[in-house]
Image (cartoon, rainbow, N blue to C red):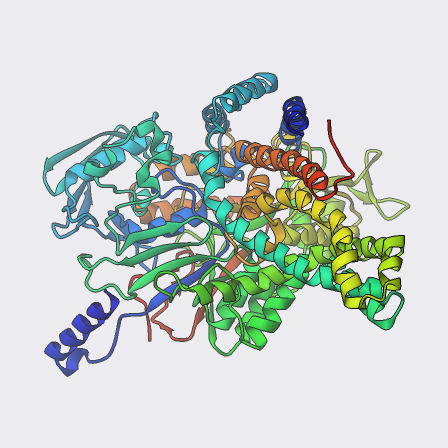
Amino acid sequence: MWSFILRRLIQAIPLLFIITIISFLIINLAPGDPVYMFVNPDQVSQQDLALIRLQLGLDKPLPLRYAIWLGNIMRGDLGNSFYYARPVSRVLMEALPNTLILALCATIFSFAIAIPAGIISAMRRNTAFDYAFSTVSFIGVSLPSFWFGLLMILVFSLRLDWLPTSGMYSLSVQGYDFWDRVRHLVLPTLVLGMGTMASKMRYMRSAMLEVIRQDYVRTAKAKGLASRVVIGKHALRNALLPVITLLGFIVPSLVGGAAIVETIFGWPGIGRIAVQAAFTRDYPLMMGNLLLSSTMVILGSLLADVLYAVADPRIRYD
Amino acid sequence: MKRSLLLALALLTLMAGPAVAQKKSGGDLLYATFSDPLYLVPFINADSASSDVCALIFSALLKYSPTLEIVPNVARSFEVSKDGLTITFKLRDDVFFHNGQKMTSEDVKFSYDLIRDPAVNSPRRMDYEAVKEITTPDQFTVVFNLSKVDGVILSYFTAGYIVPKSEISKYDKTKLKESEFARKPIGNGPFKFVEWLTNQNVKLERFDKYWDGLVGFDRYIFVNSGSSATAMVKAEKGEANRVFVPESDVARMSAIPGLNVQRYVGPVFDCVVWNTKGVFYSDKRVRQAMSYAINTQQIVSGIYKGNGRVGVSSFVPTSPYYNPNAKRYAYDLAKAKALLDEAGWRVGKDGIRVKDGQRFKIFMITNKGNIMREKILQYVQSALKLVGVEVEAQILEWNTFLTKYVEVGKFDGYVGGFSTGLTANHAAFYHSDVNKGFLNRGRYSNAEVDALFDKIKETIDLKEQARLAWKAQEIISEEVPYTFIINRTQAFAYAKNVRDVKSYDLLGWFNPEKSFVE
């Protein structure tokens, strides 16, 4: 097992290297010029533009710029954000805790709904209940979150006045107020969770369907065990296996942030920074963000494989 | 803290008796924004979020009055010598920085020397190109010696760029953007900096030692709500009491009972730029015909929903430099057709005009993302068809639009917009010298207009500048290098209990330090 993990980690290095080359190329070759973020493009002279290019290091050819960037990464330096004029690592680390809170809540929320709903749908498949759950979850995954988010704000904040519109806490609150934070979390959690609920539910449902057709479940039933015990103890444990591995794929989304939801709800997380970085052609920040998420994708899929082996004794890596 | 302040205020009110019993201060201004500032060093930032914050933390030597006259601010008085080569500022002796230090002539000299230092690379550096040397004869006198007369330099002293020497000199001047000061500024303005949480909010608090009497709000907080839509909902719900309202939402927000929407004309103009060196638009009669054929009134009321004034000049009608007598082009298809006929463009078999075998088919562009400009382009396309001009329209990505088309003159006409500043110096749009007329993308050239704008730059007397600007507009309105379309308005919504909000054309919210929440 350990040798497997080590091997995978070593394999990750060239993979990351290739990812950075491709993303560096895409980012730099995309239309748009970061220098226009610093001046009014309607009224600027060519000399000023040249000076800004020099300051940002954009006067050098692309391969050289990549080499410099890579060299700095090796030394643990992600560079300075063009836009914020601050170290990329600091900009990202400031936003990371906020993104983690929101992503964790949304994940817990979506699992908390998806697992029971998936089980019940599987047990009563092709009933009205099954269809209702499927319909609701598909609506959830199909609704664009920028629209759904605004709708939630309009209904729950503006019309019903139950919840705050956006932000992480109320400005009138002095210090830390737990319930104020919770109230601010409700809507973004709901919108973010809804989007991923459907796939988890379908996953759970099909895993459950597969398991309850197995012989040992029939045996358990034949022994005269109560249905609750058959499902809850025997079937569920095995049906959860594939779902556990989903955790591995959730890791990148935990740190990647939810660009749209964070923007709509004024949540100061990584997703919003990624959006800003793209809009402002902030190359170092975009690269830093990409490096963070792609590392997490690699680690997440490794985690998924490991969890699989831990949870399922039939799987062994050598 | 807040309570003790209120208590002190109550005591003050009691002591002063009934004469000041009316409450004139207090409350928090919560301004719902949708982008974060970048760095709060006033002469380095160029983005509006940063300069909005800096405008409250820093106060300038001079300021504009509501009638656009330049008047003293933290300078007690100023004097320009007869030859125009010396500007002397006498400073107030009661101006303090937020760290408690008194502002002196040393700070002023230090600040302007920094701006002019190429190593600092301030985007404002060229504004002070004419300054040769700054001297400080005494603690409260600053003298700017100029190498040449600069007719518009006074207006640059209305932006608050004075920073405390004792604080800024701690940092590497080439890296001020990255300095601690950029995240924790110390100024001389009505509000002092408290806290900045990235992508959340910037908190300012009343500066009690501000020289200009009691400041209105207790706190001034910029709440970053992520998107314009969310920011407006925040104001609608009362979680914020100031918000920017885009043109598309002015009508809706004005109808909300708790809000007071204020509009003002900005120092901006949108227009069609004609390529005066191209095949079609080198003849001024053809350009005049275009101005007659485009119904600007209809664009303003239809596309902009009335959020602006019909454009007639690069100068906004409320500017003292605007010439109301310059030639206007009211919508008139007959005149447009007559002028085109006169210029030799005859209507061909398919309805499109032809001259010497050349069809009148023009290439027009605008940039993607600005919906108003895209709509104007569509309108112009259909409007010009009525006078026998075919338009091939393209909407281009900004960078491509600018570098591959506009800057290299690859267009017959384009829909664009400019911001103008408040001075009489509009050389950038008209001067044939590319360095002075760096925004003259239609490559318009007229020696007389060049001379007039050169003269404005060398004239100190503002009345004389106005006379020259009027003269220039007479020529420009006859020659039509641009078809002016609109001077757009900006709109902000305030909660109704935010009192004493005054907005003026070109200046915007004039008295943020004197407003308060009732």
Give the x, y percent position of residue A100: 54, 49
Name of the residue lying farthest toward the bottom = B18
Q: Is residue B44 left or right of residue A296?
A: left
Q: Is residue B462 visible?
A: yes
**Residue at the front extreme, as displayed:** A223
The number of callouts visible is 0
A205 or A162, nearer to the observer: A205
Quadrant location of the N terminus of chain B in the rendered image? bottom left
Residue B187 locus on image (x, y percent): 26, 47
Could you tell me residue B378's position as x and y percent?
A: 73, 52
The correct choice, above or below, for A140 with respect to B412 in the image is below
Residue at 66% across, 25% down = A3
Q: Position of residue B216 (x, y in %)?
A: 27, 66
Instruction: Please indicate whether residue B129 sits to the left or right of residue B487 in the image.
Output: left
The C terminus of chain B lies in which quarter of the figure?
A: bottom left
- The residue drawn where x is 12% and y is 43% is B140
Name the residue at the left extreme.
Answer: B138
Residue visible at 26% across and 73% down?
Answer: B24
> Which image quadrant is residue B145 in?
top left
Res A312 → quadrant: top right
Which of the pair B367/B197 is nearer the observer?
A: B197
Visible in this render: residue B142? no
